[in-house]
Image (cartoon, rainbow, N blue to C red):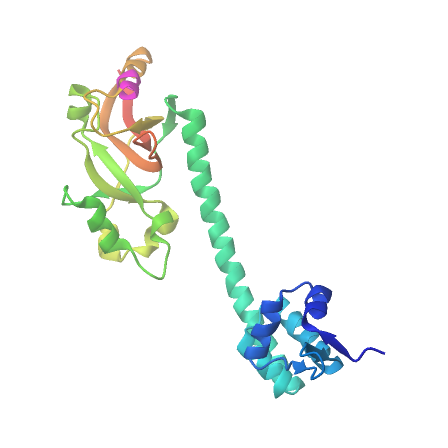
Amino acid sequence: MNEKWIIGEVAKLFGVSTDTLRYYEKAGILSAHKDKANGYRYYSYDEIVVLMDTLFFRNMELSIKDIKQIVTQMDVGDIKRILYQNQRVVEDRIQELIKLKKMINQVASHYEACEQHLGEFVLVPAPSFKYKLLEKQADDLVDMIRKYKKEDWGWLDSIRYTLLVSQEELLKNPSFRSARVGISLDEENLYRLDSLEQQELSSLNGAEYLYTIVGTSYVEPEHDVLSKALDYLKEEGRQVKGPLIGRYMASSHKDGLDYYEVWIATDNS
């Protein structure tokens, strides 16, 4: 019966590299022996058993430090505690992955909407989100990040960068060149702001809004989709009765465009 196996045989048997086996040796988990006759390094039957346990626990993503303690000094009670600790870590990761999946789905749906509904017009009820304008214009994005980036919640998927074009400016020059900037939050995220700041938020009032999706470079002297939106309202026998509110959705850096979903307050003529 073979009672020793050279490092290459063991690596091939367990589907790991020889570097991995040497790493386990250096970490104090495995002990290699040396054949004095030929100078080859080999592992004994006991080391094979230790390696099997090491790979088993590594598959559960236990750290090398914990595995070394498991195979050198822990009894079953200690090992049980290590496993339960790791279980809690995994549960936390699962919750993080669920949040990540939700965010990916949300952002992907924004890009899909931009692709499929760009420049389409529909009349919709007033949306339920609330918004406020920021005081500064030049460094608005940086100021927003400084103020609202918090470690305890995902500000990127809770706060939406928002533009406002006044009714007067929209009718005079349908573009984003005169837009003021702000933030907006859906109702389920309002609790993230303190009560004082919640009072600073405004709602969109009115019976119906024209809704569309636009892409802008912010410098167009006249935005084609906004001009068409105003024509659409005239054809529908409606008048603009409030500002344009745009909420950021997506960006295409290749095209130099940011995409917004846009609401324009309307009323029957």
Quarter location, residue 43? bottom right
Q: Quadrant of the N terminus?
A: bottom right
Q: Residue furthest front?
A: 37
Q: Does the segment drawn in magenta span residue 157?
A: no
Considering only vertical position in the picture, is 53 above or below 164?
below
Considering only vertical position in the picture, is 117 above or below 24?
above
For residue 115, say whether it is visible. Answer: yes
**Would you say 184 lies left or right of 123 here?**
left
Q: Residue at x 27, y 58 (%)?
A: 194
Taking depth in this image into account, of 104 and 18 the one nearest to the observer is 18
Measuring from the top left, give residue 15's x and y in whole percent.
68, 63
Considering only vertical position in the picture, is 148 above or below 91?
above
**Residues rendered magenta in the picture:** 224-229
Q: Main secondary structure of the magenta part?
A: helix
Measuring from the top left, give residue 25's x and y in whole percent.
59, 78
For residue 200, say whether it is visible. Answer: no
Taking depth in this image into account, of 211 and 65 the one nearest to the observer is 65
Taking depth in this image into account, of 38 and 21 the one nearest to the observer is 38
Considering only vertical position in the picture, is 21 above or below 227?
below
